[in-house]
């Protein structure tokens, strides 16, 4: 059992309880004992104290969508390295996608992930099960068994469920389990071999494009099926204005859909593929670190996503952390793997929206804590909150700290980030999971009383 | 040191006339002579020589222009390269007496390059060299057959030749450039 | 000419005349695309190509300018004319040449592009000429090797040396490029020749008209024209208006695979609507030039009569290609490595 921990003098921010003030947070026996005004908690004996002056103290971030690559692709990442990277990024709970090898389509594979996470992980790892066996899109998995084993939802992510018939069966079947179907929305016949957003940049670079419609078609289909079946639908990594609009109208009609957006889709456009500067006389690069699926889109799409965050159409922010080896990315653009290693840049990247005034801090924290907790439910206890009695999953961050991203310093094996060298303002300083400090930045010290 | 004039337009004119006479004398007439000017200022000089010889011998001498950039041995792949002009020798040179014409004769490397270029164009019976000025400091065993004026120089000095067809006036000057400043008036 | 004893000499090697007029406008270590070439730079290439053309008229078509240098051609896509053109250009400059056919070497066994490039650099290449089916491959090359890189065609993206020889051919015939109406007809979507020519032609002041079946036009083309500020580029859907009054007509090769992948209903319909026939050519100016990047599919995008007709300068393009590539090799690699 970790010792009692006092996080002292920080700016407590809990959107769920409406707490937004300077105060103390006391953790005993791995649970939150007190979160409120300064003073009373410091009377406890045998305390470790973190001085949180100048820092935001909020519930630990929850990531609904990440790829830990284990089992099967341990050269890209393992549960151990992925969870350490998550901790550095302030994430205390992460939900890992089942496109591993073997995929998480049986009780045994889900059990493997859970046990490995328990033994080697430093944050909470909640598994997502496959919708179909082998992610082939043909036969449903034993969803009830997977749910019993701990799955918090189902997805064939990496791929859509191509057949509408199979998708509607999956939705019917999962409805009674009360768990969401998470779809990676992509009409593969239309996106067919595309490498980046279909637009003026793909024309300039001579690369096959993925049109926005490829996402919107499947979003529309899924929404219609959700309406038909009454299931809980969660749309992964929304990237287009059209998708946001479809989801908005569906919510107005009362359809049970939630949606997520990634930090990179909220801040980078397709121009990032051309390199940092894309003026006519600057040398082009075909930056594979900006190659991701769904692709980086346009400024209009970003504006629509941010509006969606602000009016609730986009419920959560999820990283879609997708680590790859150097070899996978250090090659011709057409041959490079899709994906961005996102845990360790998420907060810094998102804080740019806060500093620009496009998103307020409370909304941001809510999208990273309270809202994802609602989608996961209480299977693993009450998450995303600073309520006394709940698991002490806490994130401490300095909203104004300026730092430069260096992928070489990542704890993740995946150094594939388009943000390498970027200057961010906002950095995670410490991460606590069940009362234990799992990440501590250099400038944070823990004193024993 | 400020630019000092060493040859006036009249001096240049006299040198051209004298060289024309010497060419005719040495070759016992003007038959089979081809004058080839080395880009850039060798070319108008070659034309003036041809005109003078025509006046003397009443025959037309063919005049060609030779760009030696492709034959130089002192180009650096890192530095900016010289503009390459067309080489234009309007007649077959095999069996002819070629007289190369240049404005300043210095290390001899340009002439070596010019000879390589000429031999790629054909097999002349002889190659002779006429220069307006000779400033010394040869690095190769090459000498001129016809010299307008000998001008001994120190290595940091430079000879500057102005030719009316290119520079608007005729004169030859000497000066010492400041360190780090190179003249690009050719 | 007799030789005499050398006189005492200075220690420095100083050029014979003034420092030669240098090309202060030339900015390129690599030739990747024409999107960052200025008009002055293109005219400079023309000027040097003129000089190289003279060399090509000699009995001994060789000058020693690249003596001791090695030019390696690395072709991942088959090509007769471009590869031969580069090799001849290099040989004419006295460079050593090595040609690597990717379908037969270790590349086919799965060696990565970067590894192949590093090996070629270690073997002592001074210039790598690369053709690749993936757009962007030459840019990757410049990030991982120190040698100069010339793009001989990358995917759909660029073919700068082809565009330069196209521009040069026009310049030699018409005397200028500014204000000409140049019509490019065909598979624009997959055409690296079209893209590089768009950059080059607009830089030189010409107007470019692109004409293609809708399924062979990139969806982002209009946005691309706006974003990259190319007001002299326009899109015409009807070939008649595209050809009307054109000074230059350039049909592009239509790969038969395009019909197989469903982009066109049939070759027959393409021929009906877009083939450059003598009748259609009459819509252009009477002195209009017919060009083609080659290789031609005679009977598909161009009729044999037009291909070999009086207005065709297609063979000249090939000859000019050697001169242009010699000029580029001179600019990129001429001279000693100090």
Image (cartoon, coloured by chain):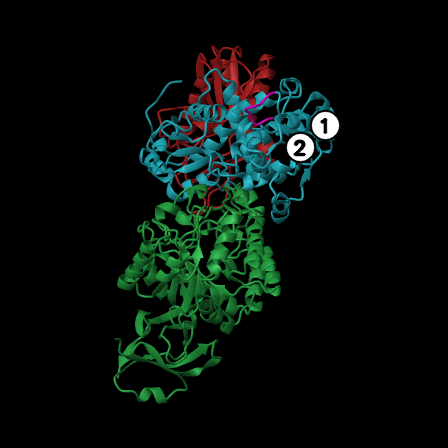
What shade does chain B have? red
- Judge whether A386 appears above or below C238 on screen: below
- Judge whether C202 appears above or below A410 on screen: above
Is C297 covered by the magenta stretch?
yes
Locate residue B129: give its quadrant: top left
> Is any part of residue C329 visible from this angle?
yes
Tally the numbered discs. 2
Residue under the image location 34 percent in, 29 percent down: C7
Disc number for residue C183:
2
Is A185 covered by the magenta stretch?
no
Instruction: Report if the CB atoms under discs 1 and 2 are less than 8 Å apart.
Output: yes
Chain shaded green: A
Q: Chain of mark 2?
A: C
Disc 1 to disc 2, C-alpha distance = 9 Å
Q: Position of residue C74 (x, y in %)?
A: 41, 31
Q: Position of residue A368 (x, y in %)?
A: 45, 68
Disc number for residue C284:
1
Judging from the image, what secondary structure is the residue with disc 1 in? loop
Q: Which residues are magenta?
A: C292-298
Asked whether, in this view, residue C290 is left or right of residue B98, the answer is right
What shade does chain C have? cyan
Disc number for residue A212:
none
* Quadrant in the picture for the N terminus of chain C: top left
Q: Position of residue A283 (x, y in %)?
A: 49, 46
Asked whether, in this view, residue A204 is left or right of residue C214, the answer is left
């Amino acid at each position: 059992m970790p010792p009692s921990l006092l996080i002292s003098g920080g700016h407590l921010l809990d959107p769920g309880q409406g707490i937004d003030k300077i105060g103390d947070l006391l953790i005993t026996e791995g649970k939150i004992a007190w979160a409120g005004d300064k003073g009373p908690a410091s009377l406890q004996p045998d305390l470790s104290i973190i001085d949180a002056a100048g820092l935001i103290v909020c519930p630990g971030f929850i990531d609904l969508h990440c790829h830990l690559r284990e089992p099967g692709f341990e050269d890209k990442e393992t549960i151990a390295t992925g969870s350490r990277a998550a901790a550095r990024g302030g994430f205390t709970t992460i939900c890992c996608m089942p496109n591993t090898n073997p995929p998480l389509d049986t009780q045994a594979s889900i059990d493997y992930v859970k046990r490995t996470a328990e033994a080697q992980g430093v944050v909470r790892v909640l598994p997502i099960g496959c919708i179909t066996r082998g992610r082939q899109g043909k036969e449903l998995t034993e969803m009830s068994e997977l749910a019993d084993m701990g799955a918090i939802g189902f997805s064939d992510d990496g791929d859509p469920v191509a057949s509408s018939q199979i998708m509607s069966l999956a939705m019917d079947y999962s409805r009674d389990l009360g768990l969401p179907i998470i779809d990676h929305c992509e009409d593969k016949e239309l996106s067919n071999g595309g490498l980046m957003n279909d637009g003026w940049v793909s024309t300039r670079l001579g690369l096959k494009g993925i049109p926005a419609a490829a996402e919107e078609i499947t979003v529309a289909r899924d929404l219609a099926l959700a309406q038909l079946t009454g299931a809980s639908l969660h749309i992964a990594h929304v990237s287009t204005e059209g998708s946001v609009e479809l989801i908005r109208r569906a919510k107005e009609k009362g359809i049970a859909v939630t949606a997520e957006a990634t930090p990179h889709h909220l801040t980078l456009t397709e121009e990032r593929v051309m390199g940092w500067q894309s003026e006519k006389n600057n040398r082009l690069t075909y930056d594979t670190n900006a190659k991701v699926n769904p692709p980086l889109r346009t400024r209009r799409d970003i504006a629509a996503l941010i509006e969606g965050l602000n009016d609730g159409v986009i419920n959560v922010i999820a990283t879609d952390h997708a680590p790859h080896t150097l070899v996978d990315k250090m090659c011709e653009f057409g041959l490079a793997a899709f994906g961005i290693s996102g845990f360790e840049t998420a907060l810094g990247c998102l804080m740019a929206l806060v500093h620009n005034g496009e998103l307020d801090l409370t909304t941001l924290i809510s999208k990273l804590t309270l809202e994802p907790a609602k989608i996961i439910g209480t299977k693993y206890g009450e998450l995303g909150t600073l309520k006394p009695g709940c698991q002490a999953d806490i994130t401490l961050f300095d909203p104004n700290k300026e730092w430069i991203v260096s992928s070489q310093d990542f704890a993740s094996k995946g150094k594939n980030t388009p943000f390498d060298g970027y200057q961010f303002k906002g950095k995670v300083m410490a991460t606590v999971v069940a009362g234990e400090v799992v990440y501590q930045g250099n400038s944070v010290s823990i004193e024993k009383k | 040191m400020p630019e000092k004039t060493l040859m006036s337009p009249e001096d240049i004119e006299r040198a051209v006339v004298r060289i024309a006479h010497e060419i005719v004398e040495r070759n016992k007439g003007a038959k089979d002579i081809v004058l080839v000017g080395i880009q850039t200022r060798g070319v108008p000089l070659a034309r003036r020589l041809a005109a003078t010889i025509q006046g003397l011998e009443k025959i037309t001498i063919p005049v060609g222009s030779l760009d030696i950039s492709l034959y130089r041995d002192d180009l650096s792949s890192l530095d900016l390269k010289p503009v390459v002009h067309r080489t234009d020798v309007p007649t077959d040179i095999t069996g002819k007496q070629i007289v190369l014409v240049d404005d300043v004769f210095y290390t001899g490397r340009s002439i070596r390059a010019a000879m390589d270029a000429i031999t790629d164009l054909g097999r002349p019976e002889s190659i002779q060299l006429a220069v307006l000025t000779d400033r010394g400091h040869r690095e190769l065993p090459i000498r001129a057959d016809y010299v307008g004026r000998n001008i001994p120089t120190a290595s940091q000095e430079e000879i500057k030749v102005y030719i009316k067809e290119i520079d608007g006036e005729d004169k030859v000057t000497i000066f010492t450039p400041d360190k780090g400043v190179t003249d690009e008036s050719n | 000419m007799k030789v005499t004893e050398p006189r005492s000499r200075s220690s420095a090697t100083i050029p014979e005349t003034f420092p030669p007029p240098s090309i202060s406008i030339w900015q390129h270590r690599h030739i990747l695309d024409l999107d960052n070439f200025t008009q002055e730079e293109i005219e400079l290439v023309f000027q040097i190509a003129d000089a190289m053309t003279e060399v090509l008229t000699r009995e001994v078509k060789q000058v020693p300018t690249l003596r001791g240098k090695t030019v390696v051609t690395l072709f991942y896509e088959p090509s007769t004319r471009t590869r031969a053109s580069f090799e001849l250009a290099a040989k004419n400059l006295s460079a050593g040449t090595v040609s690597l056919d990717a379908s037969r070497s270790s590349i086919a066994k799965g060696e990565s592009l970067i590894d192949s490039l590093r090996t070629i650099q270690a073997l002592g290449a001074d210039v790598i000429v690369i053709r690749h089916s993936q757009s962007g491959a030459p840019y990757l090359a410049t990030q991982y090797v120190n040698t100069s890189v010339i793009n001989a065609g990358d995917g759909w993206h660029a073919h700068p040396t082809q565009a330069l020889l196209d521009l040069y051919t026009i310049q030699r015939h018409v005397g200028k490029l500014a204000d000409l109406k140049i019509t490019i007809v065909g598979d624009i979507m997959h055409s690296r020749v079209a893209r590089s020519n768009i950059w080059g032609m607009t830089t030189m002041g010409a107007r470019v008209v692109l004409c293609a079946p809708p399924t062979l036009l990139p969806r982002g083309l209009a946005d691309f024209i706006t974003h990259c500020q190319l007001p002299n580029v326009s899109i015409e859907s009807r070939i008649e208006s595209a050809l009307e009054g054109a000074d230059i007509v350039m049909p592009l090769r239509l790969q038969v695979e395009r019909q197989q992948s469903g982009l066109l209903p049939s070759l027959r319909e393409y021929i009906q609507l877009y083939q450059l026939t003598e009748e259609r050519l009459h819509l252009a100016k009477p002195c209009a030039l017919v060009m083609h990047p080659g290789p031609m599919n005679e009977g598909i995008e161009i009729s044999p009569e037009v291909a070999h007709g009086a207005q065709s300068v297609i063979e000249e393009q090939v000859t000019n290609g050697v001169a242009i590539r010699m000029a580029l090799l001179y600019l990129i690699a001429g001279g000693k490595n100090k």
